[in-house]
Each structure stands twice: as C-alpha cells, then as structure tokens.
Amino acid sequence: AGGQQLKDALGPSEILQSMLAEVKERDLDRELGAHQLRADLRQQNLAAMDRAGFELEQAHVHSLLVQAHLRRGDWASARQAGDAGAHINARSSPTFYSQLEGYAGPAHAYLGCWQMASDASEARALSRQALAACRKLRKFARIFPVARPRSMRLEGMYKWLSGNRRGAIRTWEAGIEVARRLGMRYEEALTHLELLRRLEPGAASRPVHLAQAGSLLRQL
C-alpha cells in the first residue's frame, strides 16, 4: 500500500526515475554479491594451492582477488591481496608469460588504493609500493613483450597520480601503439578508456579515444 501511495504522489517521469533507481540498486547488489562469492571461492583455491605448494599460481589468484576487492571498494582487502602477491613475486623469477596477472596484481592494488588514500602518509606509502610494483612489472615486460601494454598503462597511472600528467599521457599514447603492433585489442581499448577517464571533458582527443575504444571492444 505504501508503494502505491508513493506512486500516486509522483508524476510519470518521477515514477520512471524511481523505478530505474530501484533496478540499478538491485543490479548493484547482485554484482557485489557475485564478486563476494568469487572472492570466497578464490580464497578456498588459495588454501588448496598452499597445501599443494603452487606458489606462482597463488600469485595469479591474489591478482584476481585484488580486482574483486577493488570493484567492491574493499581497499584494505585489495591492499592485503596485493601485498601477498608482491611477497611471492619478490622471491620468484619470471619464467612464463602466463605469470603476467600475478605480476600486475600488486600494481593494480597499490594504484587503486592510492587513489582512495585517506591521508598523506598513507598516500606516500602506497606511492612507494606502486612504484616498486610497476618496476617489477616493467622488468617482466622486458622478458615477455605481451606484458608491455599493461605495464605501460599502469606506469601511466603512476605518473598521473604523481602529478606528471604530460608524462602519463605520453606513456599511454605509446602503450596504445605497442598494443596495436602486438594485436592486443583489449589492452589497446583499456588504454584508450584510461585516457578518457583522465582527460578534461573538452579535450580535443576525447572523441577519438572514445571511437577507438568502442570500435576495438566491438571486435572482441
């Protein structure tokens, strides 16, 4: 009855907006619930891998956990997963190109948390961790070129957050060219999208990046 009274008090446009808001809220709840379920399953996988001694595979799962926690806005858990991956990477050497996610995970974690740091000291600590993780990923990319587009995208994020915006844009633009040469359309699209996120609304290059990202994503 209360819901009907609310609808009676609203005009058609307001009713539509209210309904859309309810749908978006339900979708968000489902999405976050799915991320939590996947995170729980990955934690179970980590326990099994630890018992089996699959350390490099654990780094990959920690990276997936980083992404899940960042999507949920759980910065503390994202940083914890990044720390766990960084600890594994510190005592291992690049041997397979498939280790890319494991090497990229800590950089994603620290950069994502840095953007949401609550005070200056925390931001400084995260910036140092992000720099170390980006350097580790860059070394990996020298051995396995498939990692170069991701490395350059994250390095650009580090430069942007450090205040070197021109350097960041140059790095992203170079990363787009590298991804194009390697035929890595998804990485190329993600770098276009990163530029879209950072450029001023009136920047002349925004329509180009939007068109390129859309075209690339439709090809996948």
Image: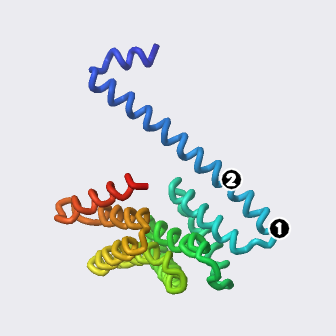
Number of numbered labels in the structure image = 2
Distance between the alpha carbons at the discs numbered 1 and 2: 17 Å
Q: Residue furthest right?
A: 51
Residue at 65% over, 72% down: 84
* Element class at badge 2: helix
Name the N-terminal-most of marks 1 and 2.
2
Q: Is residue 14 above or below residue 165?
A: above
Q: Nearer the viewer, residue 55 or 162?
A: 55
Q: Position of residue 5 (x, y in %)?
A: 39, 15
Screen quadrant of the C terminus = bottom left
Secondary structure, mark 1, is: helix
Q: Amino acid at mark 2?
A: Asp
> Which callout, 1 or 2, points to the residue nearer the camera?
1
Kindly identify which residue carries mark 2: 40
The answer to whether the residues at label 1 and label 2 have Cβ atoms under 8 Å apart is: no
Q: Nearer the viewer, residue 5 or 146?
A: 146
> Circle 1: is it few (<14), some (14-19), or many (20+) Cα within 10 Å?
few
Q: Nearer the viewer, residue 214 or 57?
A: 214
Left or right relative to 59: residue 121: left
Q: Quadrant of residue 173?
A: bottom left
Q: Is residue 58 left or right of residue 6?
A: right
Q: Which mark is residue 51?
A: 1
Q: Position of residue 32 (x, y in %)?
A: 55, 46
Q: Residue at x 59, y 66 (%)?
A: 63
Percent across and percent down for residue 121 are 47, 77
- Can residue 113 be seen by looking at this rendering? yes
The quadrant holding residue 50 is bottom right
Which of the 4 image quarters holds residue 114?
bottom left
- Residue 34 vs 73, above or below: the answer is above
